[in-house]
Image: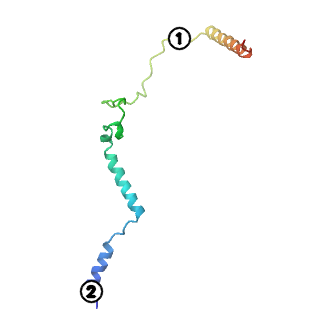
Amino acid sequence: MVSKSRIACVLVNRSLSLPVASGRGRALALSAILAIGLGGCSSTLSSLPTQLGGMPADTPQPTAAPVAYPAVHDMPPRRQNAVLTEAEQKAAEAELAALRARQAQQVATPPKN
């Protein structure tokens, strides 16, 4: 006959035992641990030689001061150049139209051999 203490011991041991991970579960856990471990070494890896995965020699060094946020509400200074008058604008448009016509004529004529 089995004693009550023996039955209680078996029941407690079964309830406390954890399921054994399968091969895929072990591989996943190992890769997660490896990724976390390598992530903690990222600052150390940047000082390695290039052959071992470090940064190239011509890589610029990071700045010591943090980059300031852009001044969103600051307005740019007023322009120094004046806006074209209507006469100046019409003259510029006429010049561009003449240039466009000259280029179209050059493309239309075959090159001389």
Q: Secondary structure at mark 1?
A: loop
The number of callouts visible is 2
Q: Secondary structure at mark 2?
A: helix
Q: Nearer the viewer, residue 59 or 1?
A: 59
Taking 85 as reference, is 98 left or right?
A: right
Left of 15 or right of it: where is 93?
right
Nearer to us: label 1 or label 2: 2
Residue 100: image x %, image y %?
Answer: 68, 14
The residues bearing labels 1 and 2 have C-alpha atoms spaced at a distance of: 101 Å
Quadrant of the image containing the N terminus: bottom left
Marks 1/2 in contact by CB < 8 Å: the verdict is no
Residue at the right extreme, as displayed = 109
> Compared with residue 41, is residue 82 higher up or lower down, i.e. above or below?
above
Position of residue 113 relative to residue 28, above or below, is above
Coordinates of residue 81 in the picture (x, y in percent): 51, 11
User: Which mark, residue 82?
Assistant: 1
Look at mark 2 in the image and give the residue it sits on: 4
Q: Residue at x 34, y 41 (%)?
A: 52
Give the quadrant of residue 72: top left
Q: Residues within 10 Å of mark 2 (few under 14, many from 20)?
A: few
Colour setting: rainbow
Q: Amino acid at mark 2?
A: Lys
Q: Quadrant of the C terminus?
A: top right
- Residue 107, given in percent of the width and then of the height, sits at 71, 16
What's the residue at 36%, 50% (across, down)? 35
Q: Residues within 10 Å of mark 1 (few under 14, many from 20)?
A: few
Q: Percent position (x, y) of residue 82?
A: 53, 11
Q: Vertically, is 11 above or below 65?
A: below
